Amino acid sequence: MSSNRYDLVVFGASGFTGSRVVELLTKCDETVNFAVAGRNEAKLKKVLDEVSKRTGKDLRQTPIIIADSGNVESLVAMAKSAKVIINTVGPYRLYGEAVVKAAVENGASHVDISGEPAFLESMQMKYDEEAKKHGVYIVGACGWDSIPCDMGFNFLKRNFRGQLNHAETFAQLNTGPAGYSLNEGTYQSLILGVANMATDGLGRIRKAIMPEKLPRSSYRPPKRRLFLGKCKNFENSRGKLWFNEKINGWCMPFLGSDKSIVSRSQYFDYTLEKEPPVSEKRFVPVELF
């Protein structure tokens, strides 16, 4: 790999998440060199100016790369200048694959914050072998939830006294001054994910990337009903919305990418290390009143 490449290129640096990534990079070792990339040079310069004022570190001379997810040539040029691309431009089902393809084919690793299972798993299906051939990595779902969930499962498996069969996770969402809110990209990803659920072909994709059938535990988690239910006993059946007395809150299924990430980790733990897979459920507590 050329030594002229930047260690990191933040693609979408002028966006909600990208600007925060740039700010976090000011805390990195100064030997880490990075560039910012996006469609609009003026907006990129504005972000560098704002982050400089907030942090007291002058980023105004940070290299700027003009790249557009709709312009393949610009993505190729960006990929050739990077060791790692941090891609913060979503929804990824609309704008992500072109960046992954350009990165992998031109020797750059790709990191994203996608919470979209169809995108994450289809990228593995399409580009895993190509990434291996070029010695680069495709690392998805590096947002706020899936890494803690995956690492939590791994920690629990390593430290559980006995053989772990089933575990449940709860993602606690805390309100800010304006209550619950989402940025536009997250909202669009959620709407598109629900709208395309029937046509994404996740079953076909999962058979392609996880062809080996895993053994199933004899334990069966509580079944869901379509109405509300309290769960005083772990073995009781539950509604789609159910009350968990252990955390004193109403819970509903979590629709993020945690299942996609944890399931693939369980698959590789079993196929590579012969570790028994753990069944899992993911929930999010919600405030009703």
Image: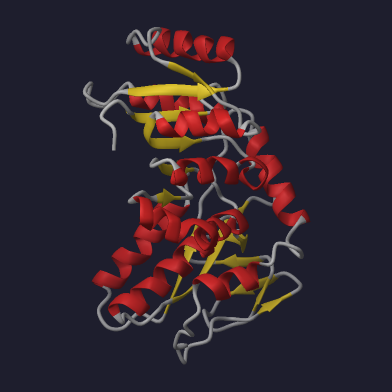
Of 194 and 223, the residue lying toward us: 194
Of 60 and 257, the residue lying toward us: 60
Whether residue 178 sits left or right of residue 143 in the image: it is right
Whether residue 247 can be seen here: no
Q: Dividing the picture into quarters, in which one does residue 238 lie?
A: bottom right
User: Residue 166 placed where, x, y %?
Assistant: 44, 78
User: Residue 180 placed where, x, y %?
Assistant: 64, 38
Whether residue 49 sits left or right of residue 30 in the image: it is right
Quadrant the N terminus occupies = top left
User: Residue 68 placed where, x, y %?
Assistant: 60, 28
Residue drawn where x is 64% and y is 29% of the image: 178
Whether residue 150 sits left or right of residue 240 in the image: it is left
Q: Dividing the picture into quarters, in which one does residue 177 lie?
A: top right
- State how the image is colored: secondary structure
Residue drawn where x is 40% and y is 79% of the image: 277
Q: Dividing the picture into quarters, in which one does residue 12 lie?
A: top right
